[in-house]
Image: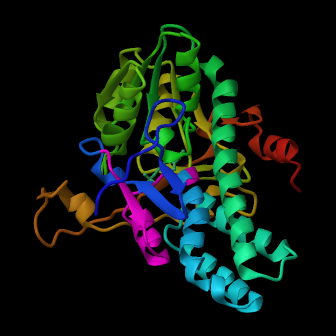
Amino acid sequence: MNSPAIPQNRLNLPETLWWEEGDLYLLDQTQLPLNVVGELQTSLEHVSDSIKALKVRGAPAIGVAGAYGLLVGLKEDRKLGLDDFLKQVHSKAEWLGEARPTAVNLKWALKRMVEFANQQSTTESGELYDLMLSEAKRIHEEDRELCRMIGVHGAELIQPGQGVLTHCNAGSLATSEFGTATSPMYVAHQNQVPFKVYADETRPLLQGARLTSWELQQAGIDVTLITDNMAAHIMSQGLIDVVITGTDRVAANGDVANKIGTLGVAILAKHFGIPYYVALPYSTIDFNMEEGHGIPIEERAWEEVTHFGERRTAPEDIQVRSPAFDVTPHELVAGLITEKGLILPPFKENLQKLYSQG
Ligand code: MRU
């Protein structure tokens, strides 16, 4: 299939995903940084497979992909009567929401789409489809703005001359534009603050090496790639002043799930007295999850551990574990950088206050 022309965002980076003339396209992140190609999504199953394969990944981006993906799956249902159309909306949203379990944004966006569909007064399925498309576009545009505001509030955490460590990719590629962890970096860079970023490569799937170092380099930010096991040494040399990551789900008490290895980085940061901040939009907060240990952790294919890319690096028949995420207890987190501002401990009370829950 030919790759379509890829639109650029305001950071002059390729859009993570886009809706064009009735179709959903994803930037195929499994091919980065070698090939920058987009892929047309032809069915609900196709979108689900793309999410599972990490063609689109990162908590906010899979939320937006889920909202548009539902519409891909509903195209043929527009000819149904309204009741049958709504049944398809419910069952397809529920099915697509199972594609990946840890990031709450996927289910959040699909729930928002279903609730929106339920609230409309139209009696015509085609019209409801169009209204739902407007809602998906709103989710997409809202994510752009939420992430930009994370940067506005977080930029001051990066002072001139400082070193910032990040893990995985919580960047433009993981969201609709500015990223979460990277948003303070992009805004500080726009403010002409000089700083250095150290990007953990993030085994096993190398989101740090393939994605974060690539997008920061494209944006002209001073970035140095390190392997995960170099982080302690780099911190011990006094090169890191602040650690910022994204998250896939924040529990009501401030515990954070993020890419496997984040917990180790947080423990190291504590040891070296370096503040660890987590950046997120409200769509990543799960107030129904009291504590982090309840967050479902995705187990991925063993081949992702037994192989480095295509090449086997472990013996045949070795026992393997492949959890894709871990949970960092809130005690290790210095602050949550949100679109509404920096939230400091106690997180349970302050999250509830800021978002008027409970
Ligand atoms: O498995 P991935 O690549 O989807 O994991 C992504 C992360 O862990 C990100 O840090 C998280 O989703 C936040 S993205 C803004």
The picture quadrant where one finds residue 96 is: bottom right
Q: Nearer the viewer, residue 65 or 168?
A: 65
Residue plotted at (55% across, 42% down):
246
Q: Position of residue 134 (x, y in %)?
A: 71, 59
Query: Height in image: 60 above or below 99?
Result: above
The stretch drawn in magenta includes residue 70: no
Residue at x 60% of width, y 47% of height: 329
- Residue at 62% from the left image edge and 56% from the top image edge: 292
Residue 8 in view in this figure: yes
Q: Quadrant of residue 35?
A: top left
Q: Quadrant of the N terminus?
A: bottom left
> Quadrant of the image for the C terminus?
bottom right
Q: Nearer the viewer, residue 136 or 215?
A: 136
Q: Farthest residue to the front: give it.
A: 21
Q: How many marks?
A: 0
Residue 193 sits in quarter: top right
Residue 165 is left or right of residue 157, and the answer is left
**Magenta segment:** 36-60
Task: Say which residue appears at 62% left-offset and 76% top-offset.
Answer: 93
Residue 207, position in %: x, y?
36, 45
Going by the image, does 122 lie left or right of 244? right
- Front residue of 109 and 74: 74
As drawn, is 36 to the left or to the right of 15? left
